Image (cartoon, rainbow, N blue to C red):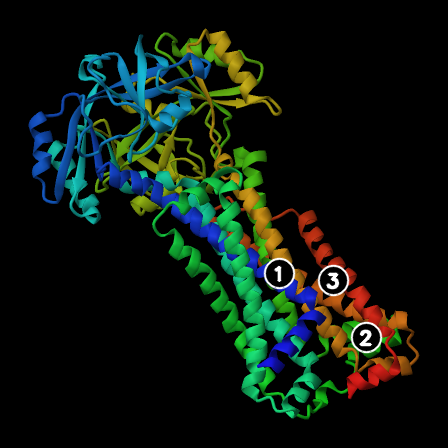
Amino acid sequence: MRAMLRWAHADLRTHRGEALFIVAATAGIVASLLLATALFGYATNPWQRVFTQSRGAHVWIHTGAGADSGRLAALSALDGVDAVSGPYRTAAATVATAASRGARAGVELRAAGAEPPATGRPLITAGRWLDPAAPHGVVLEASLARALWAEPGDRLDLAGRTVTVLGVAETAERRYRPGERPGTVWALPRALPEDRTGGQVVGLRLADPDDTDYTVQRAVTTLGSGAVTDVSTWQQARAEAQGDTKLLGQVLGLFGLGALIAAALAVFGAISTRVRGHLRDISVLKAVGFTPGQVVRIFLVQHLAFAVFGAALAVLLVRTLGARLPGRLGDAVQVWQGLPGHLPALLLVPVAAVLFIGAATCLAAWRAGRVPPVPVLPPAAAPGGGLSGAARKALALRVPPALVLGWHRAFGRGRRAPATIVRLALPLLLITVALGAWTTIERFHSRPEQLGLAAALTARPDATLTDREATALLRGNPHVTAAHPGLEVAALVPGQTGTIALRGLGTRAQPYPYSIAEGRPAHGPDEAVAGQGLLDLLGARVGDWVRLTVGGHPQVLHIVGRSIEPENGGRVISTSLDTLRENDPGLRPTLYQLQLRPGADPRTVSTELADASGGRLDIHEVTSPADRLSALRGLVAGLIAVLALIGLTELSTAIGGTVRDGERDLLALKAIGLSPRQITAVTVTALGCTALAAALAATVIGVPLANWLIDREGHASGIGAGIAHAPPLPHLLALTAAAVLGAVALAALPAAHAARRRLADTLSAAA
């Protein structure tokens, strides 16, 4: 044991840089996997915590004011319904506060008692619940409060009267989204206005959440489809709460797994190269009495120690500094550290990574144990091995011998060259995929019109503005190039259990510029384009006819194209406002999508329009998925750094192997008259050619792989395929140049040192 430790210590002192690279790469990989685990936990568990503590309802059904109260009461008798929340009387209203600089939000006023309900109970996070002693007090849902910058004690303008915010509450229902989904405001029953715009809402808590779809179908049948205006389920609320944080976790987990494989291959290559370079040392170990098992244990334990040290370093960094990371990632780590499954994951992920790396080292260590006490030089590896026909022709054409021999050393040494290229190409391939993800996110910022975001602002006029006045006011701004009138309503699809968004936007004379990924734009009557999420929901495709129910009235549309839809999970079908008016001529637009001149500042234009309208226009910036994915760019940069570190590890291994393989050829090269500088050029050229081949293979495979992965993720998220963009050619060329120049720069010093070795040392190494 003492002899094994002494040899391992001597080997570590000789190859400090290689050991440091392996430890750092392992630490980066394990840290990436731990952050991915944290993001997954952050994406799911906060919503699950709220749902559990509030005894949340699995289904929320909204009806019109005329819904039969007897049928609503009958919902509690449905099979599988464990408890009912409500029904509660509701009313639509608009709320504004001076603290939000005049911004308004559409809300659903919901009548509630002085005590929170037992089922679907809002969890107070600030302030207190409703109090009969404060009849004008309200409680705001947390996402609505954040949008209005409202806190307990603030005064709001609600439906023409002033109310006071008593508290802020979290709920497991779907969140407020400007212009798409109203926020929830709880108020005492007498605070709700008596008008025809009101309705009722009831929540159903089920004994078995898997029966949600069946229960919704029975509930809609009991109430009548004409009475139901909206249905939301716990799956929709959870998916919305997960949002893009889940995507971050998936991306980080995918790259972490790829980096783990790349690191395992790098470690395998390092041990294999070390075995070839230590044939004489291993033979001496066996000659002095070391058994094959002891030799295997030396190499295996040594590299497992590197992996354990790197994993422990990653755990320490994530544990102490993870919560201090900026943005959503730091919040994710902080929340994850407070979850019950935090400590098991903190232990299992590093252990799994170490075992994975250990499994990859077993084969190389086993090969070390098979080295005979007297190593035999393989005939194929004899010094001065024959040149290929192409190499001879190159020499005949007076190509510099250093280049020809370097190329021959890189690709003419049997199976070692392809294996080295594959190991070096894997991290470069993952970097190429990461650059593809970065480019796609940047395209959401730079070219949003190509990704379903042609409009920069959404304007919603109040009831005092006519359509003509609103259009004239919006088009009168010099920065507005087009103002597309439209509206969006919830629609039911026969045989389905949820609602989808039916959007009428633009006119046939001035159609809205949708981003069409398949088919063609909608021009004629009853023609529409649909998002990928809607097509998947209905099992439909371009060319099909679909029948929707809007407010109890049927609407039949012909899907002529698939559009890129970044909102509502792609569950959107869009047609022109003229088509919707054919069924109901009295429809008036409720919003205008504004296209701005290039270079116009949306916030400046928003302020100008708000001032010109005297506060009669509610204007919001169009939310881009790139805003929600902003944290992904920082993660991609970190992943590229980890992958570059793994690539350097493999490159250092390849340099060591190439230098050692060239030691036997050193005498022959000197014998034919090559100078030390030319011999150095042979080694440097061999490494440069290897890096170039790996970079080209990574580019050729990585670009289509990145497009496929991004489009698959777009399809799964409902946005739809067609959003992927390959990295710009200058970026790919820069990656290739960095790989080649890095290989040349790192190989220059050891190659020069080897070329100037004494002949006695060379003979000793070749013996």
Among the two numbered marks 2 and 1 on one chain, the one whose residue lies closer to the N terminus: 2
Placement of 402 over or under 366, stated as above or below? above
Find the distance from the CA under tag 2 to the CA under tag 1.
Answer: 28 Å
**Which residue bears the numbered disc 3?**
743
Residue pictured at 41% horizontal, 42% vertical: 335
Q: Position of residue 648 (x, y in %)?
A: 67, 61
Amino acid residing under circle 2: Leu
Question: Circles 2 and 1: CB distance less than 8 Å?
Answer: no
Q: Residues within 10 Å of mark 1 (few under 14, many from 20)?
A: many
Placement of 215 over or under 655, stated as above or below? above
Among the two numbered marks 1 and 3 on one chain, the one whose residue lies closer to the N terminus: 1
Of helix, strand and loop, which one carries label 2?
helix
Question: Which of 573/555 is in front?
Answer: 573
Among the two numbered marks 2 and 3 on one chain, the one whose residue lies closer to the N terminus: 2
Q: Quadrant of residue 268?
A: bottom right
| Disc number placed over residue 168 in the picture, else none | none
Find the distance from the CA under tag 1 to the CA under tag 3.
Answer: 13 Å
Question: Circles 2 and 3: CB distance less than 8 Å?
Answer: no
Quarter of the picture containing the C terminus is bottom right
Residue pictured at 12% horizontal, 32% vertical: 223
Q: Residues within 10 Å of mark 3 (few under 14, many from 20)?
A: many
Foreground tag (2 vs 1) = 1
**Which residue bears the numbered disc 1?**
646
Residue 372 visible, this angle:
no
Q: Residues within 10 Å of mark 2 (few under 14, many from 20)?
A: many
| Disc number placed over residue 405 in the picture, else none | 2
Question: Which of 151/668 is in front?
Answer: 151
Amino acid residing under circle 1: Ile
Quarter of the picture containing the N terminus is bottom right
